[in-house]
Image (cartoon, helix red, strand yellow):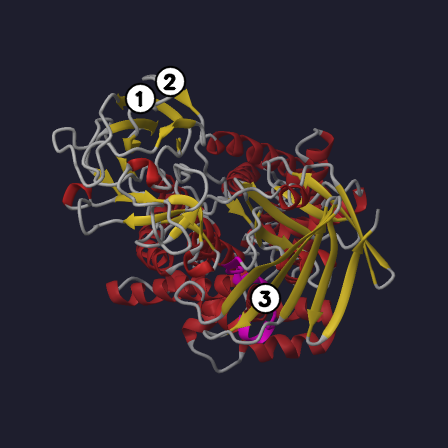
């Protein structure tokens, strides 16, 4: 699975070792949060020998992985250590410590690593995670093998829990342990906490509560899902009359907790539908628990996390066979180890890019044209042909012609170039039809001189009413976007010169139309420039393709290896453009370690996500240039929305986190205005002004205001205004 984390590639061995250790613990809960990891480490040492055993297992597995030359990033992320950790904790609880025990621990840790690589190799072919399957293989093998090992003796720890607590922290620890166990809370909640602690082979509320606090700190959504998964199971047991002691005695309820977190927010983007599937999968886990427990009892084995593995892997595998993509049950494609980031970034991505056409289309002309008939038009765009446009050129007074207007050549659009809206192959041409006199129509040759281009299977474009003998292409010719096809004319059912354009799913001239958008247009209606993506031009709009401004394009055309330096308040910010192994491009601030990921689609530059300190210049640049069209039209306004993961209000965002799978009440907005383009001799300078809004449903006052100065050498200044305090970052040559 792809990940945006590049942990472990810092050329810092000590940092790598620490990361591999901590993340081996947090990976048990699908996390890469160091605070949560530290809490889990503490919990494992509630049984000191189990804690030591787990720690040694992690160190052994990760050390062998490094010695074997396995992927350093995966080692540092804990991916190869968490299964060994679970085996170490499990056998550390079950067996008495001895020399013989630690010898077995050494080799079973290595074997568990091999199981991890083996299961990863098999399941990765199908795009599936290996979860804790290697742990199951490892611990079952030790349990079965130990029946013939006379030197391994079963531990009696756990029988005298108070003595063990006393050994850890004296009388204060005993009193604290007793206080937690005697808390007057619902029995179901008591079992929930103990089920949480059982994930790490602890079986008391104190440990469970600590884990719950860590889980809540790591992810509000994961914490909520753990409650939903467990209590759905708890009441399902009551409903069907199952033995509730199955949960309270062995505390295998952790299978429901892990299943809920995995399906509800880690492998699937959190949503109402993912939560619903958590509840629907819970009975399947329950049936799997009951059936496998009975079967494994014949061999004296515990099922541990087997039901969780079976149901989660089966469900993820089933989703791969869907013929219809369900937007509200979307797999996580870029793993960010945070359910909150998954839902916020996914929703933001869908709102920004989800409506973009899968094949980029441009308007089939140069310059500004008026939409004189749009979809479901007043004249000919009806029924099967309703999704079409007619385009003409008009002057400042709205007239489409000069002089008397009684001849085709009097019309501004007559004989103007018609261009290919996208790359494709010419599949149909009709030519040789005379242009009509003004007011006349050729109903026998309804479409007039026409061209049909195939862009992809089931996607064609048709341009009609072209000028006689003006077509410059031939059938089966491959054309590029913007390439000259012919000239605007007045042939066919056309009383005045214009371009008729439509998209269709069949190659024949005059086929039934389909609704398909242009990827990007500039709308200049009422002398106000507005940039639109995934646009369906409407009646009377004045539209044009964005014309690239080289100054803007060069400033925002970042290439891997490129360096930028700025100075603000006597402090320097060193940036470098990089690309990771998944071809994600980003700007890295070497000063703060922050990363701003971006992508370029045609003439539009987008920032997509930010990772790092939010008081860095790179963060302000990310906010200020969140979406840039590399075309300049004075006064043009661009709007967009930021992901809620960037929301600055921590307390209110905590509330939003809990609600994120169901609804959002927080709002963000980005606004950009193209202010000025000055030209003095050989010098050019562009000024852009942008604003950032964070708040509730209505956003009135901006939180941040920016000015970006651009010259022939790129971005020269970034002016930031925050709560009336102004700062200027100047480019260092």
Q: Residue at x 42, y 39 (%)?
A: 362
Could you tell me how far apart the alpha carbons at marks 3 and 2 are, in whole angstroms?
48 Å
Q: Earlier in the sequence, mark 1 or mark 3?
A: 1
Could you tell me how far apart the alpha carbons at marks 1 and 2 are, in whole angstroms?
17 Å
Q: Is residue 307 visible?
A: no
User: Dividing the picture into quarters, in which one does residue 694 lie?
Assistant: bottom right
* x then y, percent, for residue 109: 64, 39
Q: Earlier in the sequence, mark 1 or mark 2?
A: 1
378 sits left or right of 333 in the view: left
Q: Which residue sits furthest front?
A: 404
- Find numbered disc 2 in the image and state the secondary structure of the residue it sits on: loop
| Residue 195 painted magenta | no
Q: Residue at x 68, y 50 (%)?
A: 595
Which of labels 1 and 3 is toward the front?
1
Q: Earlier in the sequence, mark 3 or mark 2?
A: 2
* x then y, percent, for residue 618: 71, 55
* x then y, percent, for residue 599: 57, 43
Q: Which residues are magenta?
A: 636-653
Judging by the rendered image, the residue that carries numbered circle 1 is 469
| Disc 1 packing (10 Å; few <14; some 14–19; many ≥20) | some
Residue 80 lies, with reference to residue 34, above or below; the image says: above
Q: Residue at x 45, y 65 (%)?
A: 660
Label drawn at residue 692: 3
Judging by the rendered image, the residue that carries numbered circle 2 is 477
| Disc 3 packing (10 Å; few <14; some 14–19; many ≥20) | many
């Amino acid at each position: 699975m792809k990940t945006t984390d590049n942990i472990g590639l810092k050329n810092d061995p000590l940092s790598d070792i620490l990361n591999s250790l901590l993340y081996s613990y947090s990976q048990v809960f699908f996390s890469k949060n160091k605070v949560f990891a530290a809490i889990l480490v503490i919990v494992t040492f509630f049984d000191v020998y189990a804690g030591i055993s787990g720690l040694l297992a992690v160190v052994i597995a990760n050390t062998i992985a490094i010695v074997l030359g396995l992927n350093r990033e995966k080692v540092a992320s804990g991916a190869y250590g968490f299964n060994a950790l679970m085996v170490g904790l499990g056998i550390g609880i079950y067996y008495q410590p001895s020399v013989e025990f630690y010898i077995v621990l050494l080799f079973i840790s290595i074997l568990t690593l091999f199981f991890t690589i083996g299961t990863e190799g098999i399941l990765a072919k199908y795009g599936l995670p290996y979860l804790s399957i290697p742990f199951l293989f490892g611990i079952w093998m030790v349990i079965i093998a130990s029946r013939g090992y006379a030197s391994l003796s079963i531990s009696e720890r756990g029988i005298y829990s108070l003595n063990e607590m006393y050994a850890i922290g004296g009388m204060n620890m005993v009193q604290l342990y007793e206080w937690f166990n005697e808390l007057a809370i619902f029995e179901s909640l008591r079992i929930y906490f103990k089920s949480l602690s059982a994930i790490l082979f602890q079986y008391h509320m104190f440990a469970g509560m600590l884990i719950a606090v860590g889980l809540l700190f790591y992810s509000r959504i994961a914490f909520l899902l753990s409650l939903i998964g467990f209590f759905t199971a708890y009441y399902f047991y009551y409903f069907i009359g199952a033995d509730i002691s199955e949960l309270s005695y062995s505390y295998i309820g952790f299978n429901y907790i892990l299943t809920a977190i995995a399906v509800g927010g880690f492998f699937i983007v959190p949503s109402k539908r993912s939560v619903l599937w958590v509840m629907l999968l819970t009975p399947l886990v329950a049936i799997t628990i009951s059936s496998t427990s009975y079967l494994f009892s014949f061999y004296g084995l515990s099922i541990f996390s087997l039901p969780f593995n079976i149901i989660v892997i089966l469900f993820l595998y089933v989703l791969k066979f869907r013929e219809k993509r369900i937007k509200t049950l979307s797999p996580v494609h870029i793993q960010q180890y945070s359910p909150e980031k998954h839902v916020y970034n996914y929703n933001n991505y869908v709102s920004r890019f989800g409506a973009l056409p899968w094949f980029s289309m441009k308007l089939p002309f140069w310059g500004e044209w008026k939409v004189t008939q749009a979809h479901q038009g007043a004249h000919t765009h009806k029924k099967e042909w309703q999704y079409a446009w007619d385009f003409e050129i008009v002057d400042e007074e709205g007239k489409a012609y000069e002089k008397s207007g009684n001849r085709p050549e009097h019309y501004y659009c007559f004989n103007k170039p018609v261009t290919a809206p996208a790359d494709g192959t010419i599949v149909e041409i009709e030519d040789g039809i005379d242009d009509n006199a003004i007011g006349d129509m050729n109903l026998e040759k309804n479409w007039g001189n026409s061209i049909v281009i195939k862009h992809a299977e089931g996607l064609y474009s048709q341009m009609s009413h072209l000028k006689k003998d003006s077509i410059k292409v031939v059938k089966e010719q491959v054309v590029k976007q913007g390439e000259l096809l012919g000239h605007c004319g007045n042939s066919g059912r056309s009383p005045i010169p214009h371009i008729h354009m439509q998209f269709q799913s069949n190659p024949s001239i005059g086929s039934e139309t389909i609704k398909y958008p242009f990827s990007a247009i500039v709308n200049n209606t009422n002398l106000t420039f507005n940039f639109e993506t995934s646009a369906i031009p409407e009646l009377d709009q004045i539209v044009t393709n964005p014309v690239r401004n080289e100054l803007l394009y060069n400033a925002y055309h970042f290439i891997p290896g490129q360096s930028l330096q700025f100075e603000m308040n006597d402090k320097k910010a060193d940036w470098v453009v990089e690309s990771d192994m998944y071809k994600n491009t980003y700007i890295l601030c070497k000063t703060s370690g922050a990363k701003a990921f971006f992508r370029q689609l045609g003439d539009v530059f987008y920032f997509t996500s930010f990772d790092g300190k939010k008081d860095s210049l790179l963060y302000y640049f990310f906010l200020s240039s969140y979406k840039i069209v590399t075309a300049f039209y004075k006064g043009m306004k661009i709007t967009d929305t930021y992901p809620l993961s960037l929301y600055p209000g921590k307390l209110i965002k905590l509330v939003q986190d809990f609600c994120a799978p169901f609804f959002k009440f927080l709002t963000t907005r980005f606004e950009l205005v193209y202010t000025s383009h000055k030209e003095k001799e050989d010098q050019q300078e562009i000024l852009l002004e942008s604003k950032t809004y964070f708040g509730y449903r209505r956003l009135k006052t901006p939180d941040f205001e920016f000015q970006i100065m651009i010259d022939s050498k790129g971005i020269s200044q970034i002016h930031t205004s925050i709560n009336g305090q102004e700062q200027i970052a100047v480019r260092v040559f």
